[in-house]
Amino acid sequence: MRVSIRSRALVTVAAAASMVVVPMALPGSAALPQPGKCTKLTTKTVNTTLTANLSTCTPVAATGGKGSGTFKSSSGTSGSLNITIKWAASKGTTKGNIKFATQTTNGKCPPKSTKTSRIKITGKVTGGTGVAFKTFKTGQPITGSVCSGPKGITLEPGTALKF
């Protein structure tokens, strides 16, 4: 069977056009994946300096299983904060800007009568270094829910900090 050059060219152009359409149909940056998470958070505050320790973090290849950071804490339970997490085993750092806001209900946090609040965390990865930055890329979302009370800040039970 002979196929004309014109027919072959038309089929080739149609195939190439279909390959261009497929990437355009993919979700935008709002739907970026969150390949990492930590399921344990402990904090210590001295004056206005907050030291956060994350553990049970995955993927271990990018986090070393845990990380930590020291930040200047604000006096309120809402606002924003630039963060840098240094990962274990020389995996690098993850930088981000997070926003935090007190929620009206306490969810799985201790009751409000214990002077505990549930705080929603949202934000984006803004940079980083090393293996961690190859996994956690600029623009990826950061999400979480924490309980803030007299004993410090912990993750809301059953939740994870995702990035």
Image (cartoon, rainbow, N blue to C red):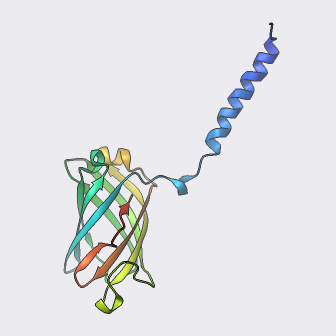
Q: Residue at x 70, y 27 (%)?
A: 15
The front one of 78 and 82 is 78
Residue 149 shown left or right of residue 137 in the figure? left
Quadrant where the C terminus is found in the figure: bottom left
Residue 98 x %, y %: 40, 67
Question: Is residue 152 among what the camera can see?
Answer: yes
Identity of the residue furthest to the top in this view: 1
Residue 39 in percent (x, y) is at 30, 62
Q: Please give the name of the residue rendered at 65% of the width and 33% of the height, measured from the top-left corner.
A: 19
Name of the residue lying farthest toward the bottom: 113
Residue 76 visible in rendering: no
Q: Is residue 147 above or below residue 135?
A: below
Residue 66 sits in which quadrant?
bottom left
Which quadrant is the N terminus positioned in? top right
Res. 69 image quadrant = bottom left
Pinpoint residue 92: horizontal percent, then vertical percent: 26, 49
Task: Using the rendered view, name the quadrant where residue 142 is placed.
Answer: bottom left
Q: How many marks?
A: 0
Q: Is residue 104 left or right of residue 3?
A: left
- From the top left corner, tell me how far across and down residue 27 is, in percent: 59, 50
At 35% across and 57% down in the image, what residue appears?
37
